Amino acid sequence: MNMPLGRVLTSERAEKIKDDLTEFTGLRGDQVAVLAICLSLGVYGKKEFSFEDATGYELNPQTLTRNGSDPWVEALFSLVYGRDLSVPEESETLTHLVRGHLNHGLYLLQEMKDGSGGRLDAFLKEISQYVTIRHLQLQDRWRPVVHGIKLFVGTDVDSSNRVEWEFNNTEKSPSPHVGIAGRSGYGKTQLLKALLAQLCGIEARVPCLVFDYKGDFARDTSFVQSLNAQVLNPEHDPLPIHLFALPDYSEKTIKRFAARMQESFSAAVRMGEKQQYRLRQAIIEAFNRRRGKAPPYPDWREVAEANCNLSQSGEADTVSGVLDKIVTYELFADSTTSVPNEPFYARNTIIDLSALSAYQELVVYLLLDHVYYDMRSKGDALISEGWQELRLIIALDEAHHYLQEDNPVLGRLLREGRSFGIAVFLSTQTLSDFSNQSVDYSELINNVFLFQLAQVKRADLTKLLRVSREEARGLEDEIHRLKPGQCVWSRPVGIGDRTYSVIEAEQFYKTIGRDI
């Protein structure tokens, strides 16, 4: 169904209030906007609004409706106003009413802030008075149920007993992130596939996003079928994502986004300070050129053109060269190309990076940044009776290519992703990959599978496994003796406590042939 909601532009006064409230509350602009709309509907009901200037910020209708998948705007306004506002001929009316309630809701929030004495707790208490007991009862009634997830990880070498893992049990593990390390050919990829098949298979409900460095996952037909996954290969077709589509298009939001994009570029491409500044300005300029147009966001071609115009010398440099390759190779969809309403990672997805050579890291960093901020906008994942809701599994194969760089977004995903329901799986060849000069990823990983390694440093074992040097010495010998398919599994059995087992790790080719 086509959404009848058109461009929602606030008044200039409302824009200033929105910027002030985002700073005051720490909420994003689109979150403040939804709060304002709902507050105004509750206070004013079927109010008819006179026209106000529309010179403020533009709220992205796709953000209001979760990319068109949630018709709450049409449904709520139709209910309040007693007529069907979802039909195309009511588009202008619906847009006018949304704009009016957005403006007046922001005015109400400003009054509440002024009356709070600048105290956030007093401001929130004032808002909470509009939430009734009935609302809370309905919220509890429709709260999703969180189920425990139990994985079969292998067989204990000593006892031959079946070994299972309560993956999302928060009483045993404060973090769901997983590290898998081992020499090539010893079973780490087979274990990773087996875990993903159990977590994200056709019968499961947790989607996964796999960054496939060498094509080992995308070319495995059995694995792709077991997940019913879509395989995206940017070498052949543009990735179906508009990276520049934002929740709103205020000046502050665009500047923050430009800084984020520059940060992701800098992690993958060596850039001087002047190049970093020019890239930020080029992104901002590309957005400015889209003001008043549809869609309100640019694409990489427009950013590349803006970057070229801002270059004083006019000569090609690292940044302009990378931008040119992104455009020439059509790695991402342009702004005029239609993409699915739901996020590309809402279903099991494998990104085949094997043919991208020098641009693999950049594509990964840009997508991780997008996923991180999109998932953060959904709020905290639920925890029920010790089980945490899982919303997305992110798997990075050959992760040493990303761990060796100072990658801020990967650090944020590992530090904060758990609270959003994200689990990150990192598969690499050496233990030292889990820590570099700037970021110690080993502190953020609680679940570790170690196959035979070419080199084992006790210092790495003590950091990653939280053991004494004496224990690390014994584990070092154990790891050197491991046979193909065997691994040392270190996992929490309670907050602060750990246990170690030598197991015959589950292999994907066995998983698909048995009833787990």
Image (cartoon, rainbow, N blue to C red):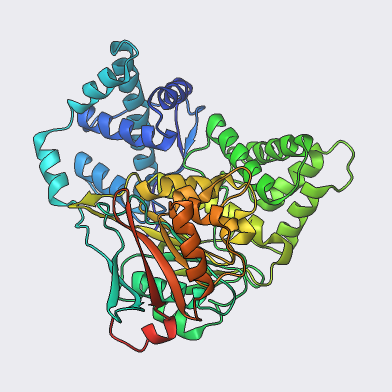
Residue visible at 64% across and 54% down? 404
Q: Nearer the viewer, residue 27 or 338?
A: 27
- Of residue 246 and residue 368, the one placed in the foreground of this image is 368
Q: Quadrant of the C terminus?
A: bottom left
Q: Residue 258, position in %: x, y?
A: 62, 39
Q: On the picture, is 462 further left or further right than 133?
A: right
Please state the horizontal and vertical placement of residue 206, each as a whole percent of the image: 34, 65
Q: Viewer-proximal residue, 333 or 472?
A: 472
**Outermost residue toward the front?**
470
Where does the image place residue 215, in percent across and percent down from the top left? 60, 75
Q: Against 329, is 11 above or below?
A: above
Residue 44 lies left or right of residue 20; in this view the side is left
Residue 332 visible in the shown view: no
Residue that protrudes farthest toward the bottom in the picture: 513
In the image, 267 versus 45, the foreground residue is 267
Using the rendered view, name the quadrant where residue 509 is placed.
bottom left
> Height in image: 151 above or below 179?
below
Q: Is residue 249 above or below residue 157?
A: above
Identify the residue at image location x=37%, y=32%: 32
